Amino acid sequence: MDASDRATALIRARQGDEEAFGALVQQHSRKVFQLAFRMMRNEQDAEDVVQECFLRAYRQLGRFEARADFGTWLYRIAANCAVDMMRTRGHRMNAKAEPLDETAPLPEVGRPGPERLAVSAEIDRLVNDALADLTAIERAAFTLRHHEGRSIDEICRTLNLGKSAAKHAVFRAVRKLRTTLAPFRIAADPGLQS
Amino acid sequence: MTMHASHCSDDDLILHFYGESANPASTHAHLALCRDCRAEYEAIARTLTMVATPAAPERGDLYGLEVWQRIRPLLPPPDPWSRFWRVLWNPLTAAVAVAVFTIAAFIAGRYWPSAEAGAPPTRSAPFAQSAGDERALTVALIDHLERSERVLLDLSNADYPDVDVSVEQAWAEDLVDANRLYRDAAAQAGETTTASVLDDLERTLLDIVHAPATLTPAELEDVRARLDAAALLFKVRVLSNELRERETAPLAPRKTL
């Protein structure tokens, strides 16, 4: 689909042409899924976000400004659908991990092999756990900043937040992650172990 | 030289890590000289480097088609106007329609009696000057109410013992000024119900803004109790739904005053 086809599909979709909307769905689904997965960290939830995103987009097509970029508009809808789903399903979407035993010896992070893989898995588990403890807006803001590489200004526009709120959301998420991952950070830095 | 009168805050360092420092050169220079800040920055960087981006499961070339087949039966039925526009979109039909409309407008302009100079101006809506303005304002107000609802919901759902409400406070602060404008506009337009809900909302937003950034469980319970007593979430949702219905309703003939 070239730029002209995309523009035509968009115009026709705004006029209620389902087939044209279908073409847009097919064009943008994978990108929406990727964002949804990063936000939700769960395949089924991500699929639900994709579905809700396109249904919401269809209902709101009348509000879409023709001069705007459809992909950007859809991205915002997807991010907000994910936020709403986090809220609906509660903050703790992942199974809560067992608390870290800080007295247990930690494997050395630098060593390759099964132990290092185990450490990576443990870090992923704790990161998931820490993210699950964030509020929906903190988690969304952090995901957009850290994983999606969006600037604070873009996060403001995407999540409809003021600049101060967007920054605070990212800061608080980072603070919680630091607390959760502190034992690993110390293990990884021999200079901090003494 | 390792000690400095003014160290970088953690928040500054987080922004610096993400390349969003207000003054990157100055932060960089400070980090080169200040051992404490450099250690703090390295700790932040190490933590954030550990947070790997999750790899999304692969989706094949037919994924878009699968999504479309899944959602197609769920789409709301199209309204008759969309069918009209679809027919009109056909370039030939559109060209003919435009030509006919232009000729008709030209003839009507020549023969239709002009409006009397002293005729009173019509007032299209209580909230705005024209139907377009009204719709735009309605959409903006719906958006404002949705954002406010999210702040209230976040506070209602805050977990113990984490009752740091700094994000909600910053968010509420962003909403207060807009809320005041909407409330004044509604009051001037005689939309008393809307003005009343926005008035309640403004007081609650200000309470949130002026509360301590970290609430004790008792203080949080107090905030929740006030929210419940005012039934504010319920009122905001009802108003939001009413406005949404108003927005999606076909344009009715405008009343004149």
Image (cartoon, helix red, strand yellow):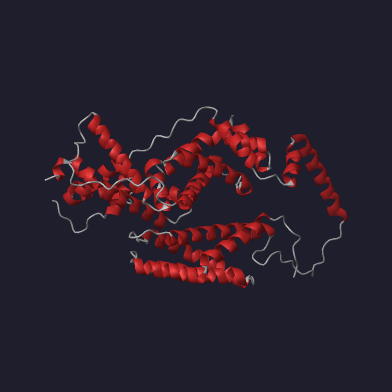
Q: Is residue B52 left or right of residue B116?
A: left
User: From this viewpoint, is residue B255 visible?
Assistant: yes
Asked where in the image residue A109 lies, by quadrant, the reply is: top left
* Residue B189 horizontal/vertical position (percent): 64, 70
Name above or below for residue B248 compared with residue A49. below
- On screen, residue A86 versus residue B72, left or right, reads left
What residue occupies the far right of the structure in this picture? Answer: B111
In the rendering, at what x and y percent does residue B72 appear? Answer: 63, 38
Q: Position of residue B251 (x, y in %)?
A: 72, 56
Is residue A7 visible to us here? no
Q: Residue at x 36, y 51 (%)?
A: A133
Quadrant of the drawing holding the N terminus of chain A:
top right
Drawn side of residue A72 relative to residue A121, left or right: right
Q: Which residue is at a point 64% across and 43% down the rendered structure image?
A: B75
Q: Residue at x 39, y 68 (%)?
A: B221
Please provide percent x and percent y for residue B211.
37, 69
